[in-house]
Every structure is written in structure tokens, then in C-alpha cells.
Amino acid sequence: MTIVPGSASQALAAALVRETGADLATPTYDRFPDGETLAAVPGFDDDRATVVAATPSNDALVELLQLQDAVREAGASEVTTVLPYMGYARQDRAFEPGHPVSARAVARAISPGTDRVVLVTPHEAAVADFFDVPVDVVDAADVLAGPLPDDLTDPLFLSPDAGAVALAETVRDAYGRGTVDHFEKTRHSGTEVTIEPSDADADGRDVVIADDIVATGSTMSEAVAALGDRGAARVFAACVHPLLARNARTKLESAGIERVVGTDTLERDVSAVSVAPVVADVL
């Protein structure tokens, strides 16, 4: 098996090589004067290819499709596509009349070029049903416990809403101690929303807000501020996919976050732990 990295997943691909003992291809990533991308795999020579490519941008998605096609063109008879982070996965339904189901459109674009897909902690597990090939969904939430300090004081693990409590429980269980709660959102108007833990007392405790993705940081920063008002000692953010778009980091820092911990599904400066072990288990 040869692992073929997309440009946004080079560190994860290298970690997978160390976990699996597979070969590592060295793709090239170019751009034509008209703006079109060209991802190629010079010298690829294997029957089995595993393309590892997060798709946080439209260019990254096109790059993935090109890498799939390149390894097929080079003779690969079996292609596995690992999507550490699947762009558009949160658009899993038509939110208004006339809107597309973008996750379905992306899945249909990826499916013809692969025999199998591996999805890492998708925002909605149901997006797996949009693919026309077999899909393995792996949960990487438990790896988030590793980078957390060993000395958390009476830790409280919070999810952003009741529907994500299982993710917070997974991180808590991997950490080995603590309690779990979730946030409650109260909408006062079209623009005013308050957010606070539903029940648990945060006073004097270290709090870990666990989520699958931090995108703009708006909800997370509100949560951090609310916890500060309730006397929390330190507040950490632990997310599988640290997208951190635009000024998300600044929002979190301004709110008083102690540290943001993420994985290498998206390669950011906060990517403190790799999902390679859980992905390797299904390859």
C-alpha cells in the first residue's frame, strides 16, 4: 500500500506511514496561470493507493479528485480515500427551498474515484450514506484527552449542546475522571443569544469544552466567557477538527481560553495529537 497525501494532510500522511509501514508517495501540487490546480503523483507504482486528503477548501477538494484519478491512471486497482476533514459535511440537508444538499454533492463527486472511504468524526454520521461506496466512520474524540494537563482540578467536560454529550463523555472517559454536562442556548432575539452550562457548578473547576469542530469560534468564545462568569478556574477547548476560520483564535484568546487542543485532521498550530492510530486500525 502507498499513502498519497493531499497538500493539506502531509503530516497526517507521514504519521500513517509510521503507524502502518506503508510507502509514502511524493505528490506535486501546482497551479496553472488561469488558476486551475494540478495535483500529480510522479513515479507512483503500486496496486493499492490510500489517498489522505482533508478538504477544507474548494481547491483541496479538486486536488483530492485529481489524486484519485492520478493513481488510477498510474495503475492502482484499489483506492481508499481517507477524509480526515470533509468540507461541506455540515450542509447535510437543504436548509431553504432551492438550496443544495452540499454534503451529498461532494460525496457523489468523490465516490467514482475510490473503492472505499474513511471518514473521521463527521459532524453528522449520516453523511456516510451519501457515498456510493463503502464507508468506515472512525471516532477520534478519545485522542483529545492525551494533550490535556494531568492535573486538571475537579474537571468538568462540557459539550456545546445536548446532542453532543457523547463526544464529551468520550473525552472524559479517555481522560479517566471528571463529570459531563452540556450548554443550554437561550435566544432572546434574532441577534442576542446567551449560553451557559445546564446544571453543573463550574466554580473553581477546570473545564474542557469538547466539540467535533471549532469553525468561527463564536459559540465557543461565548461559552468560555460564560464559564468565566461562573468562576471556572481554567477553560480548555478540545476539538477533533480545528478549522479556526478567520479570527476564531483571537475570539477564543480574548474570551480567556487557557489552551486550544486539536488533532491533525486539519494541520494547525493547535494540532497537538494525531488521529493516525485510529485511522490505521481500519486501513
Image (tube, rainbow, N blue to C red):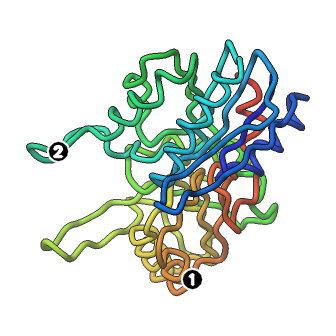
In this view of the protein, can residue 75 be seen by the observer? yes
Q: Amino acid at mark 1?
A: Glu
Residue 194, image quadrant = bottom left
User: What number of labels is visible?
Assistant: 2
User: Is 217 on the left or on the right of 18, as rendered?
Assistant: left
Please give the label number shown on residue 253. 1
The residue at the far left in this view is 97
> Where residue 149 appears, x then y in whole percent?
78, 64
Please give the label number shown on residue 30. none
User: Is 197 on the left or on the right of 119, as rendered?
Assistant: left
> Where residue 283 appears, x then y in whole percent?
73, 22
- Neighbour class for label 2 at 10 Å: few (<14), some, many (≥20)? few
Give the labeled residue for mark 2. Answer: 99
- SS for dot 1: helix
Identify the residue at image location x=41%, y=42%. 89
> Where residue 155 appears, x then y in whole percent?
65, 61
Q: Amino acid at mark 2?
A: His
Q: Is residue 254 above or below residue 162?
A: below
In this view of the protein, can residue 176 be seen by the observer? no
Dot in front, 2 or 1: 2
- Neighbour class for label 1 at 10 Å: few (<14), some, many (≥20)? some
Residue nearest the observer in this picture, 67 or 33: 33
